[in-house]
Image (cartoon, rainbow, N blue to C red):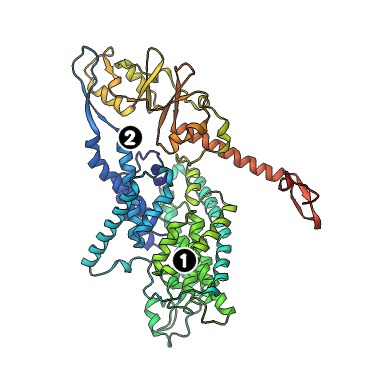
Amino acid sequence: ENKGWLNGGSAAGFFTLRNMLVRAAAVPLANAAGYPVGREGPSVTMGSNLAYLVTEAIAQPLVEQWVDVGGPGARRAPARVVDEERLAHAQRVAGAVGGACAMATIFDAPVGGVLYMLEEITVTSWPLELTFRAFAGTMACTMASYCLLDLCGTSLKAFVLYEWSARQNVWTWWDVPGFVLIAVILGPFSACHTRVALAVGSLRQQAHAALQSWQPYAKIAEGVMYASFCGCVCGLVSLLATCDSHYMKQPHVVLDYVRYNCEEGAYNSVASLLLTTSEGALRRLFSTRNTGDIYLVNTGLALVAYTILNIGMTGIPVPSGNFTGTMLIGGLVGRFVGSVVRLLCHGQDQLACTGVYAMVGSAAMLCGFKQISLAVVVFIVEAGNDLSLTTPLMMSVTISLILNRLFLKSGFDEQQILRKKIPFLPPHPPPGLARVAAADLCDLLPAAAVLAPDATVAAVRTALEQLEVSSFPVVHGARVCVGFVTRARLESALRARSGEGSGGVVAVARLMDPVPYMIPEGALVPLFYALFAKAGASVVCVVSADGEFGGVITRNAVIAATRRFEDEASSSEDEQSKEEEMLEIRGGVRVPLRWFRGRNIVAA
């Protein structure tokens, strides 16, 4: 929902004070209850929510004015008019800064917070002035966190992923094959993880719909039962772990782990990874001091248990983030591969410690899940406290993301947007829209929704009865569209003219915004798509060859057409892959005939 709003959608009923307070109370409870989740997703939403409310309180008085809507010769009728577009733009800029501040505080990475929001909302929705504002905002927010925690006698490093014992030469060329192997494994695995999680979410959505008459109690019961299930699974799997048998030689590690069912002084490494928060588990995985402390089998047990619980969490009605959750899965895979490599090489001293392999795995998994790159590297470099990790992390992210995109068209967030049918406009139109003209996208606008520059009170009331219309075209007698007026402004004008009869006149021309764009009805979609995707237009006017008003195209109409053509393209690709003509080549291998299109088949 937050990403859809930052893309240009509506936030009606979403960014309220009540929602923010409930989310703020539920996030720590969800983490304490044992859910396999993180706090970054809800924190970003809370940051945007707070920025939205503060901007509304501060900026709205600056973008409103009183306008006389009385007709010619009528008494003065002042109506309060708000410039909704300017206010929405200010709120989106502030919302992006708020989200960046949340990520910067969680990971103690101001630059990472800016890059994360840039990759999340894409360059097409990133205003030019936002870069410096996000930069300054994350700096101020992080400094404020330092100050408040210093007053409490603690440090921000106690609450974020951070390796305290950084060392020189944390990796060598001997580690590169292992890093590549991790990326090759996690690229397809992250795509599979996303697909299965989305399937679980769809099934849960269908179950919620089937139990609609029992809501919200069914969702509450489901949340409680799944928390209990997570606790039972983590507790039982931890009982299968092998307790550390070398604790006598490593007295320094006892305080960093969970004893659970082990003897006095020993620790259970699976319980130390599962019976804690995802941030606490990642801190142990990323450590460069505990190579050998987490046994290979124990790492595998934690990986299987946490992955299953993490996938099953999709769709549970609890404020949760999967950023650190997927980092933990990748970290477990990386740690497992690192342990295997060290075992095969008999613990060669030239190899990096398993904590470095865990960082590489986290980067490879997270970039595939979110399909972002820069922010992932910055966050994990900050967590590892070592700039020399930048190159291997970039290498693993590149390989993993290339392989992931072979199996998955878009990341988890984009898939969730499609599943929940949240209004969202991609930066580029699908190929099918290249043959669609503007006239084909025009909304079916009722005649009552078209207003004259000086309309009667009765005409305005009738127009407002068209509940599906939010922007009303203003057309004068020559069938020329001169502007658009919003529903909120018409309602304000009616309140100002409440003492008038139905025959009273409302000066709609004083309320409207002049038409900034006029599109010929024969123009193809790629010629004006950027008006909606990049310029932020919500409605445009379509005119005939003679310049007469022919209809309107709204942002929602473009989104609906985009979704329709994307679905048709996906369906046609599936059918093509099933019915595709195959060619048998040497050795009895069958390949698609299109591979040889335009080539000499015999030579090939």
Of residues 299 and 375, which is closer to you in this image? 375
**Quadrant where the N terminus is found in the figure:** top left
Q: Look at the numbered disc 2 and give the secondary structure of its residue.
A: helix
Q: Height in image: 594 above or below 28?
A: above
- Are the residues at dot 1 and dot 2 in contact (C-beta closer than 8 Å)? no
Find residue 240 and report its horizontal and vertical position in percent.
Answer: 52, 74
Residue 408 to residue 524: above or below = below
User: 13 or 370: which is nearer to us?
Assistant: 370
* Residue 442 at x, y percent in the picture: 48, 25
Q: Which mark, residue 85?
A: 2
Secondary structure at numbered mark 1: helix
- Quarter assignment of residue 385: bottom left
Question: Percent from the top left, x then y, of residue 2?
Answer: 39, 46
Instruction: Report which residue position mark 1 lands on.
Output: 232
Please, what is the three-letter code of the amino acid marked with disc 2? Answer: Glu
> Closest to the observer: 119 or 500?
119
Rendered location of residue 280, percent (x, y): 39, 68
Say whether residue 71 is left or right of residue 266.
left
What residue lies at 50% left-to-right and 34% top-to-bottom? 560
Q: Nearer the viewer, residue 371 or 310?
A: 371
Position of residue 488 relative to residue 348, above or below, is above
Relative to residue 580, is residue 212 drawn left or right? left
* Closer to the eye: label 1 or 2: 2
Residue 227 visible (yes or no)? no
Q: Does the image show residue 373?
A: yes
Question: Which residue is painted at 46% across and 42% down in the image?
Answer: 212
The outermost residue toward the bottom is 249
Residue type of the residue flagged with mark 1? Cys
Work out whether mark 1 precedes mark 2 in sequence or the reverse, and give the earlier one. Answer: 2
Q: From the viewer's perspective, is 367 left or right of 64?
A: right
Tell me the crowding category of disc 1: few under 14, some 14 to 19, or many 20 or more residues within 10 angstroms, Cα based: few
Q: Residue furthest left?
A: 75
